Amino acid sequence: MNWTWFHRLGSPPHIYRIAGTLTPWFAWPAGLLIAAALYGGLVLAPPDYQQGEGFRILYVHAPSAWLAVMIYGVMASAAAVGLIWRMKVAHAVAASCAGVGAWFTAVSLLTGMLWGKPMWGTYWVWDPRLTAQLILLFLYLGYMGLRAGIDDLGRADKASAVLAIVGVVNIPIIRYSVEWWNSIHQAPSVMKMDRPSMPFDMLAPLLMMLLGFTLYFAAVMLVRLRAEILRRERTASWIREVLR
Amino acid sequence: MSELSVKNLHVFRGERHLLRGLGFEVPAGCCLQVVGANGTGKTTLLRVLAGLLEPESLELTFRGQRIPPRDPDYHANLSYLGHDPALKSDFTSAENVSFNVGLRRRVASEDVQSALIRVGAAKFSDRPVRALSAGQRRRVALASLWLTGASLWLLDEPATNLDVAGQGLVASLIQEHLADGGLVMAATHQDLGLPPNQCATLEIGARGVSA
Amino acid sequence: MTAIRTSTIAAAWLVLERDLRLAVRRPAQLIQPLVFFAVVTLLFPLGYTPELGKLRAIAPGVLWVAALLASMLALESLFREDAADGTLEQFVVSGQPLVGLMAAKTLAHWLLTGLPLTLMAPLLGIALGVPVVAMPGILVALMLGTITLSLIGAVGAGLTLGVRRGGVLLSLLTLPLAVPVLIFGARATELAILGESQIGPLYLLSALAVLGITLAPLAAAAAVRIGLE
């Protein structure tokens, strides 16, 4: 098959190979950073003067919450590229993002609940961040549901891309409205980590964790992208050569 | 005069590379009859040319100008008759025709009536479409097609559900349209009774570029 | 044949008028969301308490959630018939901008569901112990909010065109996007009941409506094109 015209931009075999080469470059630093940050956060960092040892779940919660939002952004950007420049590999990137993003959203919700138990004495409080995160989870589930609901791959790609773009326009509005709602109803909010000066030995592991999680996402996304490309191109001739 | 030229048309449906580098030309006053076995892409071809389906690649020239198949001026010059005749069952034939044509151009109710007479639908012009048979509905759809005044007709199995007289009607509408200098692309195996200089056949499927 | 092309405005008007005429000929579809709205609202006194004082406290949330669900219910049929009988295909090939036609269809949907729901809300409000003086405020809030709901819904309905039994999925797609409308709308209603100034949430509701009017028809048109492929 003549690929030069079919995928003028970003041909699948090319991206497949690049993704394979890049994966370890993200995976190893991610593993090292996360391991170091875990040691720093769980062992070296002192307990919080207010929250005691309980604050340490922050080291998983904050990076997950950050990734949950960031991945939606990556997904919507890839979807937009796919829609505008008709680049099929970009749709494959968006498709590989969704599942990871939904998982990190779920993890951030779960760790938020675990954090809430010692802080509030209950697993769930309508904290604005947790609430916004819950809505984000529904946005991810809707995206995945739409993708799964359309049989034709090309149509599923394009329709879910429109949804991702609509979602990305809406996320700031949803976040703002939830903050606004919270400010009226005065629900407790303990998860504010924007204290003026977090001590360095607490902050450093957190930053390492953020970077480590981001690299981990990149590595996982590339692995999933390769699987997605294989699935999509299963009838193409280059697959046989690659898998030999 | 008007002329349609298609080059380098590639279409994928799912994983199938359905149309591979199709190319053809339709001169003014000519009909291109698209034939081929089921599933070879006759409907797909017409839907691509109507701008309903995005092809992988297509060089479309209409009246000497390279245009995208979603160009509004191109659409204004084209009339597409698909499998579904776009009729509302709660509306009468006349209401349906006047809406479908009115969307494109201004139309008086006398014109609608004369179109319905032309296709032999005058008897049931004020009956709701719900009460019509499939063949009668097809006649109403033909009235809209005839009345739009578009120069390029894209017809997908235009004679479906029609009786012998109805098939004759399709052939005569096409002949009339060609005589006015129009273009027709029709996916049909019906004999349209056209002289050879007005009709070409495009066979798609095996490896088809034969026009 | 001398053909005068229909202007975009005239084409949009034709679509709007056609949808309204179709609805009038089939009034059952018009009434169902209203009955649904009433039934859901009236379930709360039965499921919670008949005390008007307590009901008044939850009235904003109840009215808005019920209105949201009722407007969602009517959405499923927004494009379904037009897609099935080939009308949407004719829209695409009509030479008219699809965005304009989608805006007209959305406006028709609002006139047929959002507006009647709004007009019915005071009746249901009385059943929830809402004082009569609060009614004008509630009407304004619902009117603004349901516009945005129809717009969001049109995008969702377009996206689920190619999905078999897309009803549940349609709700899953649109309800999270409708959260800001719910929040601002319920707050505006609450303030109306308390007799305080609603100006803040009403501004926010208007902002959402303006944003929706600018962007939603574009997204709906893109979704419909994709759905027809």
Image (tube, rainbow, N blue to C red):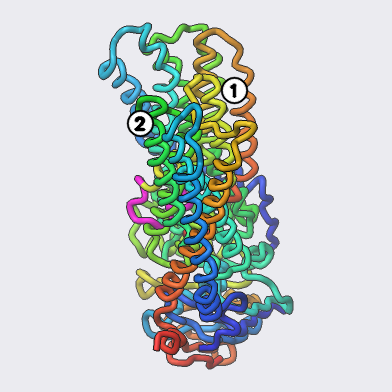
| Location of residue C9 (image quadrant) | top right
Q: Which of marks 1 and 2 is in front?
A: 2
Mark 1–mark 2 Cα distance, whole angstroms, equals 31 Å
Q: Position of residue C92 (x, y in %)?
A: 56, 59
The region drawn magenta spans C155-168
| Residue B209 shown in magenta | no
| Residue C164 shown in magenta | yes
Q: Which chain carries label 2?
A: A
Whether residue C114 sits left or right of residue B24 in the image: it is left
| Residue C201: assigned label | 1
How many numbered markers are drawn? 2
Callout 2, which amino acid?
Answer: Tyr
The residue at 37%/81% (across/down) is: B38
Q: Is mark 2 on a helix, strand or loop?
A: loop
In front of the other: A126 or A207: A207
Q: Where is residue C189 in the image (x, y as percent from the top left)?
A: 51, 18
Task: Report crowding for label 2: few under 14, some 14 to 19, many 20 or more residues within 10 A (C-alpha).
Answer: some
| Residue A123: assigned label | 2
